[in-house]
Image: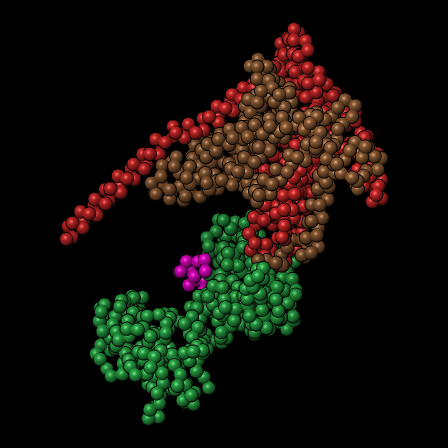
């Protein structure tokens, strides 16, 4: 181990700097948590309050007054479903584009990636008009279908990158062992590419969870997702900051846990997508 | 510029464990010497080299380069050059840029850089490769670029970490000679790490045989080959591995004889070999009540086809054809309990390729008059000395 | 004895040859199954992305106001003309462009520095990195709202902290002159960790002996970063650059919730303009035209960057 070659400083100052920077960076989150625990009166101070009597009123209210659990449920349904469909499509096409010598494979891959450049605004209108006619407005299905389409390009790109990384010797060993192409895919390639696939799944899930514009366009009340519910706290003459922060903090926790468990894979997935 | 290691130790702490990679090493390398650290994997030789480079900090002890203590000095400032086992060439730079980066960083004027690069490239035969990137070069070519990068700086010390181990056999032999030639020409103090004892023997002025973080013996290749300090050194250096026979000493009529015993008690003697006087008499006398081990190299055996009194009876297990010399792998016939050999369960004897031997053929082994057999105390493994 | 041997050998040879033929013949035979795997994705994208896009382009050729559906009229490229001639459009395009360039460049520099800082092996570095990347996983909506809360003039905690350390209170999003800075800070907070961690992964993927060789060659940290790291990381940097540029240009949620495009038009991004035109104004024909223009601009920028990267970065077969 090259102990002498740490790029910046020696042990303690460098560690302190790292910790300090991250702590500073997280201040807004810290502030959000504080705000979520304040009453309206405590928020409305001229000088911001750091020490106070915390209250769980906000957390209470979002469930009793605005029925946040509906939004959470909707988001869960939509995100899980879209992520599932995206991953199915992404694994299939990622495999083909990543390991099979297709005549126009390169072009197809690039075309798929280019679809990511489309602003949701552009497709928002056609979708709206289409769904009005289909009667799908405010139905989960609408968002699931749309999110799947939007999420596929990025997921394909990531998964493809991971499939490319797998050495060809594994395929050859599998063929010699008597496996068919399908079995090879199922039993060998997918398990090996699982980290990348999980990363793509997480990113897709989080994207569908956080998306605002299309959800706004295509739902009204019943299929409301979390971001919409959160922004509904902006009332006409004032903003229910406490509730906004509370509802945001609730959904951060599970996300945090997942990210922490997979953080090494996430970074690896990002780089592999970038460096091939 | 000399390199002196004094009481050098390196301990790695892993929570509760501690790994003592290097234990209290004391080595002196003279200016201009080619010194090898030889030993099996994990013996601490690479760790030691890296400490000299400054890439690892010693837990205790001091390092002196040219008389100055550099133990705490950053690698950058030590004026040492290292050739890594993997060459560590910068992949995005051409061979030329790899060679000259260190000069550029030290603000050497451009013309001088170009001159030095031309000289070094010619010396190593890579002038035609300078525009290529590492991926476009073969293993041997990359290795020479890595060497060039070290040479061009004219450092005070060269550090080489098993630079030849990634090359195939023929190339390794060629490069071995190249390295020797370069060393003769440049006369820069060189510290070389290897696990290949043949390589070390050919290249070094002096070597240290290391085992488990300790230097078992330091000396010239001849000294180490012919006068190993202990069994480990005797076994490690020399190919094929030395034969070790277990037995005891008898002094009869003024001459000492080594008796190869079958059992722990001295009753059953398989062979008797008079000793040639490598070890002083008083030491031999003192060792008469211990168990002793006799070390005989494969080329020191003399093979007889008929039984002779006092010679060990063996049977040919199989033959190794190694080109000009053949090796007969022999097993002991009368040693049912397998106690007579201290190193494996077979003996190796060198036989010239004229001899026609077949498997299962009985042979009787004698020891040549010129042989420099070695005696070790069985318990300590150390050479019997005065 | 010998004859049987020869016959055995011959049989083995023939057998192997036959097997090899089978394997070779299996090659092209598989392709229809392969296409079967790829087809669903392509079909799905065609139906749910390309078709809506085409439809959108179609809509953009109409004067279509949702509030007056009776007045739909096919106006060919009039919407586009209107856009090009509109000063608001040009202004918002400028805002978007400025924002994108400023955000991406500043975030890259900051990210590189942060990556070097976070490049340590210490206990809990995994936890640090997880905490650090939280902003990336937040909903942009939430981010916008959060910063709006923090920036609140007078009661804003940001300004409060500034005054506490002796700096003047800048009413970040309260005035047009500093609002772009305020938005940039928010965007940097949200996205720099992403760039930083990708760069960090790249930095750590450099084999340790290259770093050591550089150290022995006499390079200090700055020289190492400049001469070794940056060139080696070039492909990574370019790809991240591409992704971030495209995404930054499209930013909507966070800025919308932070400033609604104001004060005045100082943060009025093209994405906001297009959305408002459609949402508030109901002019979906015009809105779609602007969205199409946005897509075209993104594609041009993307194409330029991709061509520069060389298509080999995206090939499936090395």
Q: Residue furthest bottom?
A: B253
| Residue B168 magenta | yes
Q: Residue at x 22, y 69 (%)?
A: B360
The quadrant the N terminus of chain A occupies is bottom right
User: Percent x, y for residue B215?
Assistant: 51, 72
Q: In the rendered image of this protein, does residue B179 appear above or below residue C21?
A: below
User: Percent x, y for residue B195?
Assistant: 46, 65
Decide which of C1, B255 is in the foreground and name it. B255
Which stretch is magenta? B165-183
| Residue C5 magenta | no
Q: Residue at x 37, y 79 (%)?
A: B294
Q: In the rendered image of this protein, does residue A257 appear above or below residue A2?
A: above
Give the number of marks. 0
- Residue C206 lies left or right of residue C100; in this view the side is left
Q: Chain B takes which shade in the image?
A: green
| Residue B299 visible, this angle | no
| Residue C160 visible, this angle | yes
User: Percent x, y for residue C51?
Assistant: 54, 19
User: Percent x, y for residue B262?
Assistant: 30, 78
Magenta segment, principal secondary structure? helix
- The quadrant holding residue B345 is bottom left
Q: Residue furthest top?
A: C70
- Residue C261 lies left or right of residue B332; in this view the side is right
Q: Residue at x 66, y 64 (%)?
A: B73
Q: Residue at x 23, y 42 (%)?
A: C14
Decide which of A137, C86 is in the foreground and name it. A137
Q: In the rendered image of this protein, does residue A265 appear above or below residue A152?
A: below
Q: Which scheme is used to colour this image of the protein?
A: by chain
The red-coloured chain is labelled: C
Q: Chain A takes which shade in the image?
A: brown
């Amino acid at each position: 181990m090259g102990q002498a070659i740490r790029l910046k400083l020696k042990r303690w100052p460098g560690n302190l700097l790292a910790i300090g920077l991250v702590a500073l960076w997280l201040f807004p989150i810290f502030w959000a948590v504080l705000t979520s625990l304040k009453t309206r009166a405590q928020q409305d101070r001229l000088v911001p309050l750091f020490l106070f009597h915390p209250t769980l009123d906000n957390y209470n209210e979002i469930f009793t007054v605005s029925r946040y659990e509906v939004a959470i449920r909707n988001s869960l349904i939509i995100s899980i479903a879209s992520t599932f469909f995206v991953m199915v499509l992404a694994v299939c096409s990622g495999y083909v584009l990543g390991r099979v010598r297709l005549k126009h494979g390169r072009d197809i891959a690039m075309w798929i990636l280019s679809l990511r450049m489309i602003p949701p605004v552009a497709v928002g209108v056609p979708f709206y008009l289409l769904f009005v006619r289909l009667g799908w407005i405010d139905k989960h299905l609408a968002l699931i279908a749309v999110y799947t389409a939007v999420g596929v390009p990025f997921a394909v790109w990531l998964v493809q990158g991971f499939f490319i990384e797998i050495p060809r010797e594994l395929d050859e060993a599998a063929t010699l062992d008597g496996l068919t192409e399908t079995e090879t895919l199922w039993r060998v390639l997918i398990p090996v590419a699982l980290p990348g696939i999980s990363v793509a799944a997480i990113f897709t899930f989080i994207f569908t969870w956080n998306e605002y514009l299309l959800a706004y366009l295509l739902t009204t009340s019943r299929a409301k997702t979390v971001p919409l519910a959160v922004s509904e706290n902006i009332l006409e003459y004032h903003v229910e900051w406490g509730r906004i922060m509370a509802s945001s903090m609730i959904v951060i926790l599970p996300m945090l846990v997942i990210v922490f468990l997979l953080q090494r894979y996430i970074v690896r997935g990002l780089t592999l997508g970038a460096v091939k | 510029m000399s390199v002196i290691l004094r009481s050098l130790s390196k301990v790695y702490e892993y929570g509760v464990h501690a790994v003592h990679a290097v234990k209290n090493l004391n080595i002196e390398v003279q200016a201009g010497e080619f010194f090898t650290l030889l030993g099996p994997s994990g013996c601490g030789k690479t760790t030691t080299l890296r400490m000299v480079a400054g890439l690892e900090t010693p837990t205790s002890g001091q390092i002196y380069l040219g008389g100055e203590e550099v133990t705490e000095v950053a690698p950058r400032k030590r004026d040492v050059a290292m050739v890594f086992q993997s060459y560590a060439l910068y992949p995005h730079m051409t061979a030329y840029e790899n060679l000259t980066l260190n000069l550029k960083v030290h603000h050497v004027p451009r013309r001088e850089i170009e001159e030095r690069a031309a000289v070094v490239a010619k010396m190593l035969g890579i002038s035609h490769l300078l525009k290529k990137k590492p991926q476009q070069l073969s293993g041997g070519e990359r290795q020479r670029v890595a060497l060039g990068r070290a040479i061009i700086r004219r450092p005070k010390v060269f550090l080489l970490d098993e630079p030849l181990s990634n090359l195939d056999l023929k190339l390794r032999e060629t490069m071995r000679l190249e390295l020797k030639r370069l060393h003769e020409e440049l006369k820069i103090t060189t510290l070389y790490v290897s696990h290949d004892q043949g390589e070390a023997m050919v290249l070094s002025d002096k070597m240290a045989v290391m085992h488990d973080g300790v230097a078992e013996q330091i000396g010239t290749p001849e000294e180490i080959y012919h006068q190993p300090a202990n069994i480990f050194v005797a076994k490690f250096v020399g190919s094929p591995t030395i034969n070790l026979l277990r037995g005891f000493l008898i002094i009869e009529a003024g001459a000492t004889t080594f008796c190869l015993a079958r059992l722990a008690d001295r009753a059953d003697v398989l062979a008797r070999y008079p000793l040639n006087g490598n070890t002083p008499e008083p030491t031999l006398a003192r060792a008469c009540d211990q168990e002793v081990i006799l070390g005989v190299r494969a080329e020191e055996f003399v093979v007889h086809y008929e039984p002779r009194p006092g010679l060990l009876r063996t049977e040919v297990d199989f033959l190794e054809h190694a080109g000009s010399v053949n090796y007969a792998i022999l097993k002991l016939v009368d040693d049912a309990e397998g106690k007579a050999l201290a190193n494996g369960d077979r003996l190796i004897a060198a036989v010239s390729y004229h001899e026609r031997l077949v498997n299962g053929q009985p042979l009787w082994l004698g020891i040549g008059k010129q042989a420099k057999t070695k005696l070790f105390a069985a318990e300590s493994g150390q050479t019997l000395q005065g | 004895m010998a004859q049987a041997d020869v016959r055995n050998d011959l049989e083995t040879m023939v057998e192997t040859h036959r097997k090899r033929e089978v394997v070779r013949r299996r090659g092209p035979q598989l392709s229809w199954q392969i296409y079967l795997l790829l087809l669903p994705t392509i079909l799905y994208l065609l139906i749910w992305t390309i078709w809506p896009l085409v439809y959108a382009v179609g809509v953009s050729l109409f004067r279509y106001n949702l509030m007056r559906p009776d007045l739909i009229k096919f106006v060919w490229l009039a919407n586009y003309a209107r856009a090009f001639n509109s000063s608001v459009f040009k202004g918002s395009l400028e805002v978007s462009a400025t924002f994108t360039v400023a955000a991406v460049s500043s975030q890259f520099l900051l990210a590189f520095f942060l990556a070097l800082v976070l490049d340590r092996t210490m206990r809990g570095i995994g936890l640090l990195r997880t905490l650090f990347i939280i902003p990336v996983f937040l909903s942009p909506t939430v981010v916008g709202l959060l910063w709006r809360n923090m920036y609140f003039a007078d009661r804003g905690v940001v300004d409060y902290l500034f005054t506490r350390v002796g700096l003047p209170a800048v009413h970040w999003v309260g005035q047009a002159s500093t609002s772009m800075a305020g938005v940039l800070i928010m965007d940097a907070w949200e996205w720099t960790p992403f760039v930083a961690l990708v760069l960090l992964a790249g930095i750590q993927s450099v084999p340790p002996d290259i770093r050591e060789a550089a150290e022995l060659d006499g390079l200090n940290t700055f020289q190492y970063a400049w001469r070794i790291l940056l060139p080696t990381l070039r492909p990574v940097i370019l790809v991240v650059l591409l992704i971030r540029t495209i995404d930054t240009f499209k930013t909507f949620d966070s800025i919308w919730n932070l400033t609604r495009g104001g004060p005045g038009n100082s943060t009025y991004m093209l994405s906001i303009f297009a959305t408002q035109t459609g949402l508030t104004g109901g002019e979906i024909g015009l809105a779609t035209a602007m969205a199409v223009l946005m897509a075209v601009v993104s594609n041009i920028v993307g194409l330029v960057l991709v061509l520069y990267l060389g298509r080999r970065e995206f090939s499936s077969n090395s």
